[in-house]
Each structure stands twice: as C-alpha cells, then as structure tokens.
C-alpha cells in the first residue's frame, strides 16, 4: 500500500511568487491534514479535511493560504503571494477515520522563500 | 488551548543503552491521547507509541515504553537497548478525544534530536 506522498519535496521561490504544494493521501483515507514546521519551532496544525470539506481551518495563518481537496482525493495548498515567514516544512497526513485513527504522515515539502 | 513542551533539544545515547526522552503537556481536558512520533533523517514521520489518558497502564511497544504521569502531566519515552536506527528526531504530541471534528488535530512539541553513538 502506498503511503502519503507529497510534491514537490523541495521548493525555492522568491518573495511575492506563488507556490502550490500537493498531497496525495493513502487511498481510502477520508481525513487529510496539513501541518507546518517553521525551523526550530513546533509542528503546527493548519487545517483538516474530511473528504472534500474543510472540517477545521483554525490553523491557517492568513488569507494568503488556500487549501483545496478535489473530489475528496488529493489536496493542494497554495501560498499566494509567498512571504519570507512562510518558509518551513509542510507536512500532510491522512487517516482513515476509524478508531484508533492513526495519522500517517508524508515526507513533507521544504519551502524556502528568498 | 493545549501545549506540549519538550525542553531538551538534543540527547545522545550509547548503542545498547537506555535513554529517556521527556515531554510535559498542559491541558484542562480529562480525556485525551498522547503520542510519540519519530522522524528519521529521511523525513517520513512515523508513530512510535500511543497512550490513552484513561488507561493507567503505561503503553509498551517492543523496546519503546512510556512513563505516563497524568497528575504531573508528564509523558516520557524510554528507549531500551538503543540501536543505530533509533537516531532521529522525536516529537511528543497531544490529541483531544474523541477522534472527530476539531478534536482530530495533533499538537506537537518542538522535538528532540536523538543521536546514537556506536
């Protein structure tokens, strides 16, 4: 069974540009989460999808971030326009939604904004 | 809001020895789950062990065990017979129960980098 995949693994962009991160969850997993780790700090929750619906987006930092989940399958996280403080590692996780509901993480996308 | 604190940024252990990683948390909830995640240098984070707060018995998974002190809000991870493959960053995480809706998110500590000396 394929795990959670993320693309790209690394992205370097200039301030003001747009970047789109993609996450493919494990097949059949209804729950999809985005997290972010800024260097030296905690991994922070961004948002949670249940199928194609946003269940909780309380962690989204501002309206420069837009997350979508097309048809309840893969998800994209767009940052537009990117700022220096957006640099970090963006993790995606998915879970089946059945107890014990373990979250499986992807390898992350390292975003560097220069 | 819940917080998780890992105050030790780095630790080192000799191969085959035992090491304990510390974690404290703060919450007003009575029912919750605690986790230790491991992130090896290849960056894929995996679940090491889970503890349900309502269970008094400490969780154990092979060489990994926890010391869960609910009153003290402490959740340490003990790795016995350390192996070179245990070298990684370890994150302590908290999650409210039940596993639905806004309670699904994980709250993480800053992590601790564990190195294993051969």
Image: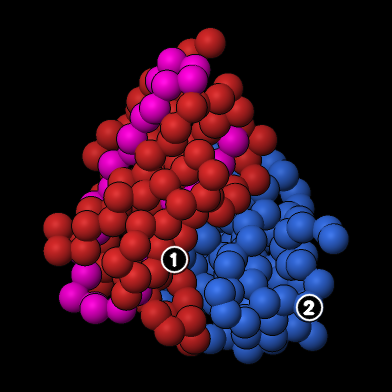
Colour assignment, chain B: red
Query: Which residue is identified by label 2?
Result: A28
- Residue at image position (77%, 58%) is A3
Q: Nearer the viewer, residue B52 or B3?
A: B52
Which quarter of the rendered picture does the N terminus of chain A lie within? bottom right
Image location (x, y in percent) of residue B15:
49, 17
Which quarter of the rendered picture does the C terminus of chain A lie within? top right
- Give the SS element for disc 2: loop
What chain does badge 2 belong to? A
- Residue at image position (47%, 77%) is B104
Q: Quadrant of residue B32?
A: bottom left
Query: Which residue is identified by label 1?
Result: B106
Q: Nearer the viewer, residue A59 or A81?
A: A59
Q: Is residue B16 magenta?
A: yes
Above or below, A58 relative to A26: below
Above or below, B89 relative to B97: above
Image location (x, y in percent) of residue A93:
62, 63
- Residue at image position (50%, 39%) is B63
Above or below, A38 relative to A66: above
Judge left or right: residue A81 versus residue B64.
Answer: right
Colour assignment, chain A: blue
Chain part drawn in magenta:
B13-40
Image location (x, y in percent) of residue B57:
34, 62
Asked whether the beta carbons under mark 1 and mark 2 sit within 8 Å of each other, the answer is no
Above or below, B107 relative to A75: above
Judged from this view, the residue extending furthest toward the right is A1
What chain does badge 1 belong to? B
């Amino acid at each position: 069974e394929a795990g959670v995949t993320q693309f790209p693994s690394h992205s370097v962009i200039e301030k003001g540009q747009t970047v789109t991160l993609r996450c493919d969850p494990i097949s059949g997993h209804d729950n999809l989460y985005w997290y972010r780790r800024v260097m030296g700090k905690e991994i922070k929750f961004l948002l949670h999808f249940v199928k194609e619906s946003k269940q909780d987006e309380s962690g989204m930092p501002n309206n420069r971030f837009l997350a979508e989940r097309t048809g309840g399958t893969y998800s994209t996280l767009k940052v537009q326009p990117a700022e220096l403080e957006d640099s970090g590692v963006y993790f995606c996780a998915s879970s089946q939604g059945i107890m014990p509901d373990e979250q499986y993480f992807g390898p992350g996308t390292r975003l560097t904004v220069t | 809001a819940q917080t998780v604190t890992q105050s030790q940024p780095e630790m080192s252990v000799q191969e085959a020895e035992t090491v304990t990683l510390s974690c404290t948390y703060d919450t007003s909830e009575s029912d919750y789950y605690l986790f230790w995640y491991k992130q090896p240098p290849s960056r894929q984070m995996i679940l090491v062990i889970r503890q349900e707060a309502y269970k008094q018995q400490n969780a154990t998974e092979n060489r990994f065990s926890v010391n869960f002190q609910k009153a003290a809000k402490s959740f340490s991870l003990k790795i016995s017979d350390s192996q070179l493959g245990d070298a990684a960053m370890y994150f302590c995480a908290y999650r409210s129960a039940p596993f639905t809706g806004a309670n699904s998110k994980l709250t993480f500590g800053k992590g601790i980098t564990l190195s294993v000396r051969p």
